[in-house]
Each structure stands twice: as structure tokens, then as C-alpha cells.
Amino acid sequence: MTKKFRSNLKLGLLDSCDFTAEASRVCRTVLPSGVRILSEEIPGAPSVAIAASVAVGSRDESDDTYGSTHFLEHLLFKGTSKRSARDISVAFDSVGGSSNAATAKEYTSYYARVMNSALPLALDVILDMFVDAKIDGDDFELERTVILEELAMGQDDPEDVAHEALASALLPGHELGRPIGGTKETILATKRSSVIDYYKKHYIPANLVVTAAGGVTHEQLVELVQQELQKFGWLDETSTPNLRRAQD
């Protein structure tokens, strides 16, 4: 059984926490901008896993944008206004951390694992990628080639083929029944301008969820997120979720 209480971090924030049977503390905050912050504090943990997720997946793509969600997952690691792709990689390597990303049918997540002391750096890099992706033309064409190779490899994987066939049979003609990464034809037809428009439409405060688990308190995480969002002008920016989802 969990025990709930209401906390009071800052005026205007919606906060709640649960204590689990394992004594970890699970908390949730919603900022006025709509950004959601969730954490699980694990006492004594020397490291922390952090993720910035956007509530957009392959099911949210139209026929014209099919494959754009996965395309963006690749492109966000290619650099920002202040960081090159190498800078992003070195930032995590320099503190012994790791980073990756994943595209699903209803969300895209960018995540890292670092020692507790490196959490501010990890959060700064991930939110920089999220808010200020450069999406350079040369990088776009390079990643188009990489994605086409990934799709070809997937067709050689019996498990991937079976999952895609099952989804298509269960949900014929529905966005949830389509392969997540698009098809060779849609990726070849994808335009950089279309992906940039897709990025600007969906990578907004109301669609951002920041999560962390490990050696961090919820108060520390909320403060760090607020500091980062202030840098990018997202702390007070308001937006409205623009996706079809079941309500809580």
C-alpha cells in the first residue's frame, strides 16, 4: 500500500508523492507550462537514470509525416546551437555515463544514466537536445541513409517481422498497426522542412515529461528542471497538448 501526501515546493505547482513498500519515494509535479516531472528517489543509490520524453509517437503521424518521429530521434543527437554531435557524446563519456533514445507508437524518449553528481550536466544536455535541435541539412541526409539501413536490418529479423505482421493484422489501416520507423518509400520521400515543422509542433512544454530514478530527491529534480527550462525560455511558456490520448 502507498501513502500519499501533498507537498508544497512552489506556488502554482501541482505535487503529489507516494511512499512504496520498498521505501522509495515516487513524486509528480506539473509546472504551470504543462511540463510534467516524475521521480523515484532510491535512498543510497549512487547513480541516477534520467529521461526527457515527448508524448508523440508513430501513431500521431499522418501519411505525409509517416516516419518523422523516428527521424527526429536520430536528428536530436546531431547537435544544437551550442553543442555538436561530438560535444553531446563527449559530455556523457566524460562523466562515465551513457545515453540513448527510443521511439514508440505513443512516445519518444531520450535518456541517460550517470552518477548522481553528473545529473545537472545530463539534464542540461538532454533538454538542450530536446528544445534546441539544429536539424542541419547534411545531417538530415546522413540520417536518412542510417534509417534506411535500420529498416533493411529489421526486415532480416524474424522477431521484428512477426511483431509488425501481428500489429498490421490486428489493426489494419490504423496508425497503431504500422511499423514505427516508417517504410523505405516514406523515408525516401521525407523532406527536412516537414520534419522541422513536425518538431516545432510536437516538441512543446505540454508534451514534455521529465523522469528520474535513483539518488536524487524530487525537490532537487524540480529545481534543476526549472533552471534548465528558464535558460530556454520554456519555464513560463504555455502550450496545449495536441495529441489524442486517454485522460487520467
Image: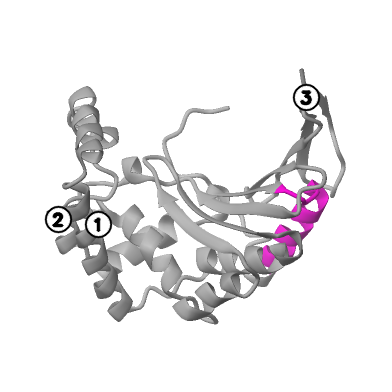
Q: Could you tell me which residue is drawn at 25 percent across and 37 percent down?
A: 159
Q: Residue furthest top?
A: 1
Q: CA distance from mark 2 to mark 1?
A: 10 Å
Q: Are marks 1 and 3 in contact (CB under 8 Å)?
A: no
Q: CA distance from mark 1 to mark 3?
A: 42 Å
| Region of the chain picked out in magenta, as a range | 214-230
Q: Earlier in the sequence, mark 2 or mark 1?
A: 1
Q: Could you tell me which residue is drawn at 32 percent across and 60 percent down?
A: 71
Q: Earlier in the sequence, mark 3 or mark 2?
A: 3
User: Given the image, on which type of amino acid does mark 2 rest?
Assistant: Lys
Res 25 → quadrant: top right
Mark 1 neighbour class, 10 Å CA radius: few under 14, some 14 to 19, many 20 or more: few
**Residue 216 relative to residue 54: left or right:** right
Mark 2 lies on a secondary structure that is helix
Q: Main secondary structure of the magenta part?
A: helix
x and y, in percent, of residue 114 in the image: 65, 60
Quadrant where the C terminus lies? top right
Mark 3 lies on a secondary structure that is loop
Quadrant where the N terminus lies? top right
Q: Residue furthest right?
A: 8
Near-viewer residue (130 or 217): 217
User: Given the image, on which type of amino acid does mark 3 rest?
Assistant: Ala
Q: Are marks 2 and 1 in contact (CB under 8 Å)?
A: no
Mark linked to residue 21: 3
Q: CA distance from mark 3 to mark 2?
A: 48 Å
